[in-house]
Image (cartoon, rainbow, N blue to C red):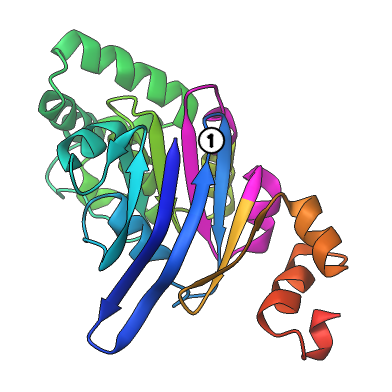
Amino acid sequence: MLDIQNITKTYGSYRALSGITLQANGGEVFGLLGPNGAGKTTLLRILATLLRPSSGSASLDGHDITRDPEAVRRSVGVVNGGMGLPARLTGREVLRSFATLYGMTRAQADARIAELDNRLELGRTLDVRAGEYSTGMKQKVVIARAVIHDPPVLILDEAASGLDIFARRTLLDFVHATRAPGRLTVYSTHVMSEVEEVCDRVAIMHEGKLLNVSSIPEVLDRTGAASLERAFFALVRPEAPHAR
C-alpha cells in the first residue's frame, strides 16, 4: 500500500532526504523511527502531497503522489503534533464540517462520530468548544478529524507528543485497532517504546538516510543489541560505548 522509490529532497545545497526506498503493506503498522532532523516529517509531507520530492517517486494505496495527488488525499488521513482546531467550534461541529468535505451526509457523519467516540473516548470533547480543550482532548479530535472519512492509509507524525498518560494510552490502543487487511498506518516517532509496542516493522532514519527496514527482532539480530535503543545507536553511532 506504500511504495517509495529513491525519494530525494533538497533545499539548495542541503539534502533533507537521500534516496529513500521502502515498501509497506496492508495490515501493517509501519514505524518511522529517528531523532528530530532525521527527515521523517519531510518524507511524510511528501507522501501527503504537501511537498514535492526533488527526485524519485512514491504511491499510496495505488495512487501516484505527483500524478494523482487528489486521489492520494482522499485515501489518506494525516495527524501531527502541531495541528490546531477552530477555537469557537465544538468537536462535533469540527467533525461534521470535515465529513461534509468528504461528501458524507449528516446521518453518515453522526454514525461515524459515534463510532469514533467509542474508539477514541471522545466524551465531552464532542460538545465543548475547542478553545477549552486540554492538549489530550485536542489531539483526540484531531485524530478523529483525520479519519472521519475512514481512509485506508493513516499517517501519524509524533501524534503522542505532549499527551498525558491517559490520552497516550487511548492513542496507542487506537493504533493497535487500525491493523486490518487493506489498511496501513505509518507511525512516526522518536520514542522507542511506542515503536516496540505498536509497530510490525520499522524504518530507522538518520540525517536524511535510511539505515534499516525490518521487524524489531530482525534489527536486534542484525546489530546484536539487547534493546531497540541499543540497536538504534549501533546503526547510528557504532563506535559509541552505548551501541554495544
State yes or no: residue 16 in magenta.
no
Q: Residues within 10 Å of mark 1 (few under 14, many from 20)?
A: some
Highlighted range, magenta: 174-201
Q: Secondary structure at mark 1?
A: loop
* Quadrant in the picture for the C terminus: bottom right
Whether residue 162 is visible: no
**Front one among 16 and 18:** 18
Residue 64: percent from the left, percent from the top? 27, 42
Q: Residue at x 39, y 35 (%)?
A: 153
Q: Nearer the viewer, residue 213 or 130?
A: 213
Q: Is residue 240 left or right of residue 144?
A: right
- Name the residue located 30 percent from the left edge and 12 percent from the top edge: 111
As drawn, 23 above or below 235:
above
- Whether residue 157 is visible to the viewer of this picture, yes or no, is yes
Closer to us: 199 or 127: 199
Quarter holding the N terminus is top left
Q: Residue at x 64, y 44 (%)?
A: 198
Three-letter amino acid code at the position of disc 1: Asn
- Residue at the spot 39% in from the left edge and 25% down from the top edge: 116
In the image, farthest residue toward the top: 107
Q: Is residue 235 left or right of residue 39?
A: right
Q: Quadrant of residue 52?
A: bottom left
Q: Which is more toward the observer, 137 or 211?
A: 211
Residue 46 x %, y %: 29, 57
Residue 232 at x, y = what percent?
70, 71
Was residue 183 drawn as part of the magenta stretch in this picture? yes
**Residue 24: where, in percent of width, then height?**
52, 42
Numbered circles on residues, count: 1
Mark 1 lies on residue: 25
